[in-house]
Amino acid sequence: MAAGLFLSRWARLEASGAVTERAKARSVILIFNCGAPSHLDLWDMKPEAPTTVRGPFRPMATTVPGLQISELMPNLARHARKLAVLRTVHHSHGQHNSGMYWSIVGRPYRIDSTLINPSRADLPSVGTLVGWLAQRDGYSGSIPPYVITPHPHCDSTAYITPGQFGGCLGSRFDPLVVNADPNQPSFRVSGLGMSQGLTAERLEGRCRLLDEMDRPLPVEQDELQVHRSKALQLVTSESARRAFDLSREPASVRDRYGRHTWGQSHLLARRLVEAGVRFVTTVNGPSIVWDTHSDNFKALKDRLVPPMERAFAALLDDLEQRGLLESTLVVWMGDFGRTPIINGQAGRDHWPACYTVVLAGGGIRGGQVVGVSDATASYPKDRPLTPADVHATIFAALGYDPHDISYVSAEGRPTPLSEGTPIRELL
C-alpha cells in the first residue's frame, strides 16, 4: 500500500516536471553557517568590481570550465562537478534569527528581529518537515529522524532561532539536539545509554511501574508518553550508541574531516545518515560566528573558511566513497549574504537581497551555476530564487510533491510543504 502511494506521488511529480529519474535522495545533510558567510568572498566573486566591493581574495579555477570560486576553497574546487551553485537566492529579513527562520522555514517570520525565540506557533523548518514525513511514512529508527549537531541555530544562547523545533506540529516532532562537542574526547549525548549501575531488568521494572501509574493516561499527557517512549528507545538502543560513537572511526578518517567541532560534526552527520536518520543539520557555529562586521577578510582566511571547507570536502569524499552521495542531498547555506560595499572596519554587514546556496548529491545535477547576480552581487540579475524554491527542490529530490502535501498551521490552515517551485535545472 505504502509503495503504491509512493509510486503514484512520484508519477505526479514526473508528469509535472518537478522531478526526474535522478531524484533519488533518501536523506539530507544541511550545513548551516550561522551568522551568514560572505557570498562575494566565497562563491560569487566579482574580480572586476571596484576595490570597495571585490576584497583581496582572487577567484580560482575549478574542475568545471568557467566555474570559479574563492582561492580560500581549494578542497571544494576539486569537487565542482558535484556542486550546484545557486547565486541568486534572496529574501528580505536582515536580522539573524528571523533571517535564519526564513532560510530554514522558507517563509518570513512575523517580525524581522534577532530577539526572538521558538514557540509552538512557529511554522516548521524543512528539517522538521522531513522528520514529520518520515514518521508519517513509517520511520521506526531508534534515533529521531531529525538531528541537529552540535548546537541549535541561535544568536547567543539567549535567542534561539524559531522554526527548527516541532513548532505547530507539536513537540513529538522536535529534533534531537546533540548539545555536545563531537570533537571532545569525552563526547557523549545526554540520555544515550543507561546510567552506570542501571540494568535492563531494573529499567524494565521502572517502565512497568510507570505504566501502572499512568493508567488511564489523560489525553493532555499524550505527548509526555511520546517523549518517554523516544527516551527509552535512545537509552536502550545499541544501534543508536554505535551511531554516535566516533571512536569507531579510523584516526585517518577523523583527521581528514579535521579535529575540530565542525569537522567531527560533519563526520557524525555521515554516521547518522548511515544509521537511517533522514535529516541532519550540522551547525557551523557557535552562535553567529560568521557575522563578520569587522575584519571580514582576516576572519575568513585565518579562522572560518579553512575548517568549513575542509569538513565540507571531506564529507563529499566520504559519502562518495561509501556509495552514499547519490542518496544523500548535501545543502550548504547561511542566514543571508554580506554587503557588497566593504565597511570602514574592513567588514561586511547583513545583506539578504542576494546570496549563495550550494547543493550536492542526492541526484542533484552538479557542475553548474544557477542564477546570475548583478555586477556587484547586490541583486539577482537573472533567475532569482528564494529559500522556498530551495526547500521545494529538497522535497522533490526526496520524492515528495511540495505543493500536494500539507500540514495544519497553528491557526488551523492547511499549509503546503513549500510555496516555492522546484529548481528544474537541478532535478
Image (cartoon, grey):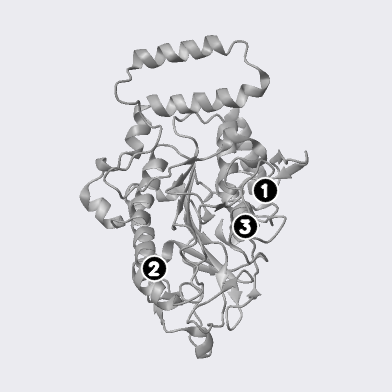
Contact? badges 3 and 1 (CB < 8 Å): no
Q: Earlier in the sequence, mark 3 or mark 1?
A: 1
Disc 2 to disc 3, C-alpha distance: 27 Å
In front here: 302 or 426? Answer: 302
Q: Earlier in the sequence, mark 2 or mark 3?
A: 3
Q: Is residue 253 left or right of residue 268?
A: left
Please give the name of the residue rendered at 59% of the width and 84% of the height, measured from the top-left corner.
Answer: 375
Q: Which residue is mark 2?
A: 305
Q: Is residue 427 above or below residue 72?
A: above
Q: Is residue 412 left or right of residue 149?
A: right
At mark 2, the secondary structure is helix
Q: Is residue 21 above or below residue 96?
A: above
Q: Nearer the viewer, mark 3 or mark 1?
A: 3
x, y percent for residue 299:
40, 73
Q: Which residue is mark 1?
A: 15
x, y percent for residue 420:
68, 55
Please give the name of the residue rendered at 71% of the width and 58% of the height, measured from the top-left corner.
Answer: 111
Q: Is residue 52 left or right of residue 304?
A: right
Q: Which residue is mark 3?
A: 115
Q: Nearer the viewer, mark 1 or mark 2?
A: 2
x, y percent for residue 250:
22, 46
Disc 1 to disc 2, C-alpha distance: 41 Å
Judged from this view, the residue extending furthest toward the front is: 158
Disc 3 to disc 1, C-alpha distance: 44 Å
Amino acid type indicated by mark 3: Leu
Q: Is residue 420 above or below residue 219?
A: below
Q: Is residue 220 above or below residue 122?
A: above
At mark 1, the secondary structure is helix
Q: Nearer the viewer, mark 2 or mark 3?
A: 3
Amino acid type indicated by mark 2: Val
Q: Earlier in the sequence, mark 1 or mark 2?
A: 1
The reply to whether residue 319 is visible in this rendering is no
